[in-house]
Image: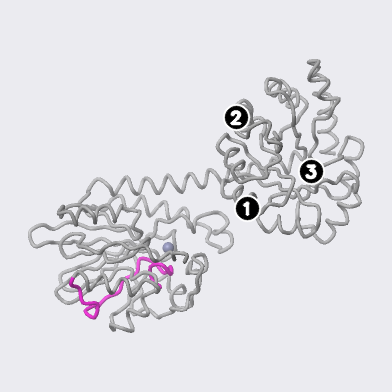
Amino acid sequence: MKKNFWEGYIAPDRVFGNLYFVGTYPASTHVIETEEGLIVIDPGYPEALDTVLENMRAIGLDPMKTRIILCSHGHYDHAGAVKALRDMTGAKTYIGRSDLDMVEKGIRTWAEELGTEYNEAFTPDVLLDDGDHVQLGRTDILCLSTPGHTEGTLSFFFDVTDGEKTYRAGMHGGVGCNTLYGSYIKANGLEGMREKFLAGLERLKNERVEIFLGNHVHNNDTAGKLARVAAGDKNAFVTPNEWVPFLEGRKAHLLSIIASEEREAETVRTITEEKLVMIVRGVPADQMIPLAEAMYRGGVRVMECTYDASGKTPDEETAAIIGRLAKHFEGRMMIGAGTVIKESQVELTAKHGGRFIVSPDTNVAVIRRTKQLGLASLPGALTPSEATTAHNAGADFVKLFPITTMGAAYLKAVRAPLSHIKFLAVGGVCLENIPQFLAAGAAGFGMGVNDADKKAIAEGRFDLIEEKCRALVKAAKA
Ligand SMILES: [Zn+2]
């Protein structure tokens, strides 16, 4: 049976003094033991609650003594079990004010993305704002608003003590960038959240944190530290030098996502504007740079280097050529890969600096991997069904292929009901019929190196290539 995402087991133990870890993998649940009862921070997935309760009992904590349930944010993997735990214990529930709609109405709870359904709605007793304190016994938790991952995300800071020593514990309440991708922000109207997230990271650097907690166990290597606690090191979680580097790391992660999205958008923009993709297949490796330079002089700005489906040229070799071209033409011409029929070729291309992926077929796995890696996707399709499948999988353009014998009339007919899809005409396109394809609504063209070009290359007549490209570029942009 397939293992569910909440089933990873981590043995519960004391973090330090009156603070315990009782969660599962990958979502953390922490318990603070106070003179007046227990505070549970993020009870976790509803499906994991039985494990969490069992964990509490196993280390001598009575779940029925829970007085406060505090949520870092409203997502399913942190707040999903609040309702059940509250119904069982009568504890008061606390959450950041802006996440109210999540837990009360089930909006954007991330449950769907985790492959389940949110039906654990509850109305919190207390809505927290920036700077509020949550108190029980001698424990006083400072709650700081750190929006970004969700609008209501709260970060927590409080003292923990073993009677002799007191340390300051801290947890950022939501560092996942899963909700900070451009596509998610756009789909959910969350503009401005990246800036808020970065500002929150900056702000939290000022907090003194000696015991660094994660609300996901990978944030602070919870499992590794608990293993050290179990082996007798009661200070395993006392790590005053981990907090700021952690925040810096999260900042770098978001900035790399933003940079990758900007690069991807630039690729799509360039193909949209240039319209002409020159396809290079079967040209000797040592002729690639002079050929590409001639194309560049002729005005070409997008060049596709094809993988060899016959296997005679190994994929690594093709990828290395793509890498050399990408480096040579950085900032001048976009280099991508063609005849991509496997995800491994997408990965190789991305690794070597290729910017886009062209395929002869509609392969949803290839399209998805392409978009995951921040490249532009240009899969092949011939029928309306294939074109729609490609578009829905995330293709930026659909290469209508092979359009050779059907010509511009076919493009026009397919495009009529599918005008939201940007079609590139590939196969049988030449200088003479470019105007017909443009009139039929082609967003661009793919054109290969033909026998005449290969002869010119063999003879070193790159001026002929340059001349031909100049005419094609002019026609494509007419
Ligand atoms: Zn979350």
Q: Position of residue 409 (x, y in %)?
A: 91, 51
Q: In 3D space, how far apart are the residues under numbered discs 2 and 3 (Cα atoms)?
A: 27 Å
Q: Which residues are magenta?
A: 60-80
Q: Residues within 10 Å of mark 3 (few under 14, many from 20)?
A: many
Residue with the mark numbered 3: 444
In the rendered structure, the answer to whether residue 201 lies left or right of residue 297 reads: left
Q: Where's residue 146, x and y in %? A: 38, 59
Q: Amino acid at mark 2?
A: Ala
Q: Picture coordinates of residue 439 (x, y %)?
A: 89, 47
Query: Residue flagged by tag 3: what amino acid is it?
Result: Gly
Q: Which mark is residue 320?
A: 2
| The quarter of the picture showing ligand 1 | bottom left
Disc 1: which residue: 365
Of badges 3 and 1, the one in the foreground is: 1
Cα distance between the residues tagged 3 and 1? 24 Å
* 67 part of magenta stretch: yes
N-terminal-most mark, 1 or 2: 2
* Amino acid type, residue under disc 1 in the picture: Ala
